[in-house]
Image (spheres, helix red, strand yellow):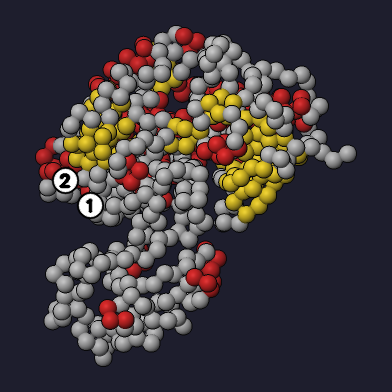
Amino acid sequence: MSRPRILIVGAGFAGYRTARTLSRLTRGRAHITLLNPTDYFLYLPLLPQVAAGILEPRRVTVSLSDSLPDVRLVLGEADRIDLDDRTLHYTGPEGEGGTLAYDRLVLAAGSVNKLLPIPGVAEHAHGFRGLPEALYLRDHVTRQVELAASSDDPGTCAARCTFVVVGAGYTGTEVAAHGQMFTDAQVRKHPLRRGMRPRWMLLDVAPRVLPEMDEKLSATADRVLRQRGVDVRMGTSVKEATHDGVLLTDGEFVETRTLVWCVGVRPDPLVESLGLPMEKGRLLVDPHLRVPGRPELFACGDVAAVPDLENPGSYTPMTAQHAWRHGKVAAENVAASLGLGGARTPYRHRDLGFVVDLGGAKAAANPLGVTLSGVPAGAVTRGYHLAAMPGNRVRVAADWLLDAVLPRQVVQLGLVRSWSVPLDTSSPEVARVPGGPGQRQDASARSGPGAALAADTGDGGTGAGGPGRARPHDEPAKGQPGSGPTQVRPGSGAAEPRSEWETAKGRPGRPGSGPVELRSEAETAKGRPATGPGGEPGRNQAGGEPARNQPGGEPAKNQPGGEPAKNQPGGEPAKNQPGGEPAKNQPGG
């Protein structure tokens, strides 16, 4: 008799716990497959400490292959589920497609950034749901403070040192608290001119910080934030975001280069495509976490609307605490449905309290309903995280100890660019890469109206500022790896952005190059030429046709078959060199 096939989608708190518990219960009597975009489980509550430079990125990750030895890991993102055929179609990390069959399916896809119809937010803000976003924020904040220190303009210095966080929930509060400490430590070693101090703003339309938590917890967090210098503004949010700053709902315009979007989360849009009963974007399930009418389908975590038996008529909130416990109950009920475990059990759980890390020795906690603050709360908070983490406890504790006795390293690694972490994405845990497969935020994807794709160029060097503003449905920012060619209208005076490679070589941008197909990493390594649509050589590549979009239809200068470059031996002087005419498409040209 063949072993049943169990497929789990997502390796967040719910999916990881489901896989681990099922592996223990089935003892090799079932094929367990885990589909996830990354090969690690991310301990999300410690992500603000990664952004603040306290913890190294790998400390908050747990290898799926090492911790789930009896589970088959498939890297990819679910695209479509055929409930009648019991198959799931996915896309791998290099763009290849695949199909997985199942006898039992557990949906634990998690959540993505929650978007609001506010002009400019998708283009200029960045979320805080994945490791790439945390790494980008750490580099970006460090860069803004360093650029502010070298600026002679007081207005530019103040704008770069102003950081706006929208959303005073669990994540936003911790990001603002750790961020203020991080930048204060940076300017203590390298003071800003004119004695300026970094300014962090925390905005929310709610009447208080941490509105979903106990009022005593909220009061403690609010007091610590204000004492630290955070500008806390309740009842206020963003009306519009621009490349120069944000317009608040109270009419004030705040000049800034940084907008961190922590408004909340929404369930992964994958479940919307199933056509099953929903509750505010979440898939309706019974107390046993099974979808009514679909005995083979289970759901848990943020994508599932699980009845709260402790509060009849409501559903369990979208928290890590509930998702972790959903996973255990889902695994037990899946095993029971296959005859590999005991009887089915309903999900029932009471909150054990919450902990909020405010940086240093400060925290707010209410374990078992007992409200704590200060050092006792800090000890309870860190003890809880060490106990809840499924791995890396010794490494995390060592990083905490080193941070307490040694100065924090403040450097830019430059690993993640602005266009790699758009706000509007269904995969915040995966950063865009040059030449990589399109993510699910394409027009045909299920992520919504478009992605935030502003590049790390221009004034501010972030998606929140700079002249190269991106638009919804755009490609990655022009002039960045993985982007298409930039079109410049004659007489517009806008120069075409140069790629990183051209900038490094000191070469001017190529005028009006034709569309060139991106090469894979393997092709790049082998030195193969880029090809155009249909497999033909790119228009500006060796063996290709001359560029068609040059003035007068002439071949592109400095290309095979074209005229000699103006600044090469035997050619005329370059247009933008001394003695030459102004360069075309440049100011004054």
Q: Residue at x 47, y 37 (%)?
A: 112
* Rendering coords of residue 113 (x, y %): 43, 36
Q: Secondary structure at mark 1?
A: loop
The reply, left or right, for residue 406 in relation to residue 235 is right
Q: Is residue 487 above or below residue 339?
A: below
Q: Which quadrant does the N terminus fall into?
A: top right
Visible residue check, residue 308: yes
Residue 373, by quadrant, is top left
Q: Give the amino acid type for the residue marked by disc 1 in the picture.
A: Asp
The reply, left or right, for residue 281 in relation to residue 173 is right
Residue 582, by quadrant, is bottom left
* Rendering coords of residue 2 (x, y %): 85, 40
Asked if the residue at tag 1 contacts the one at tag 2, i.e. Cβ–Cβ closer than 8 Å, the answer is: yes
The residue that label 1 is drawn on is: 459
Q: Secondary structure at mark 2?
A: helix
Q: Which quadrant does the C terminus fall into?
A: bottom left
Query: Which residue is the extreme one toward the top?
Result: 370
Q: Give the amino acid type for the residue marked by disc 2 in the picture.
A: Thr
Around disc 1, counting alpha carbons within 10 Å, would you say few (fewer than 14), some (14 to 19), or many (20 or more)? some
Q: Is residue 585 above or below residue 463?
A: below
Using the image, tell me which numbered label, if any, was put on residue 156: 2
The reply, left or right, for residue 352 in relation to residue 502 is right
Q: Residue at x 56, y 11 (%)?
A: 312
Around disc 2, counting alpha carbons within 10 Å, would you say few (fewer than 14), some (14 to 19), or many (20 or more)? some
* Rendering coords of residue 403 (x, y %): 39, 33
- Between 146 and 231, the residue placed more toward the observer is 231
Query: Which residue is the extreme one toward the bottom?
Result: 570
Visible residue check, residue 360: no
Query: Which of marks 1 and 2 precedes in the sequence?
Result: 2
- Between 331 and 181, the residue placed more toward the observer is 331
Q: Residue at x 36, y 11 (%)?
A: 216
